[in-house]
Image (cartoon, rainbow, N blue to C red):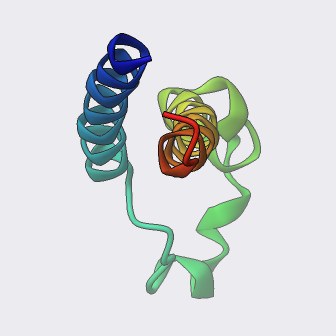
Amino acid sequence: MAVVKTILTVVFIIISVALTVIILMQESKSAGLGAIAGAADTYWGKNKGRSMEGMLVKLTRIFVILFIVIAAVLNMSIF
């Protein structure tokens, strides 16, 4: 069981670093003065799910779920 715990710990560290990098790559969610002029209704504002920003949001969700699951497994006393 020590081998499984070591492998999970390494995967946990890799996910932690990847999650940090992905979060730092994302743009700010505050609209600033662009919200006053209605800049949020542009083509890129409507199709964010298909852009690079949308992909980063999806990856963030996946890595957060993996992070929580692995953290819970590592904290169980069966190892």
Estimate the x, y position of residue 40 in percent, counting from the top left.
65, 64
Q: Is residue 45 positioned above or below 13 on the image?
A: below
69 above or below 39?
above
Residue 63 position, x and y percent, is 52, 35
Point 34% across, 11% down: residue: 3
Q: Is residue 48 above or below residue 7?
A: below
What x and y, as percent, mark residue 74? 48, 41
Task: Say which of 65 and 59 sits in front.
Answer: 65
Q: In the image, residue 73 lies at what x, y percent?
A: 58, 39
How many marks overall? 0
Residue sitting at 67 percent across and 24 percent down?
A: 50
Residue 38 picture quarter:
bottom right
Residue at image point 76% right, 45% down:
46
Asked whether 63 or 67 is in front, the reply is 67
Q: Looking at this view, is 53 or 24 the one in front?
A: 24
- Image quadrant holding the N terminus, namely top left
Which residue is at the front of the view, 31 or 49? 49
Q: Is residue 45 above or below residue 62?
A: below
Write down the quadrant of residue 27 in the picture. Answer: bottom left
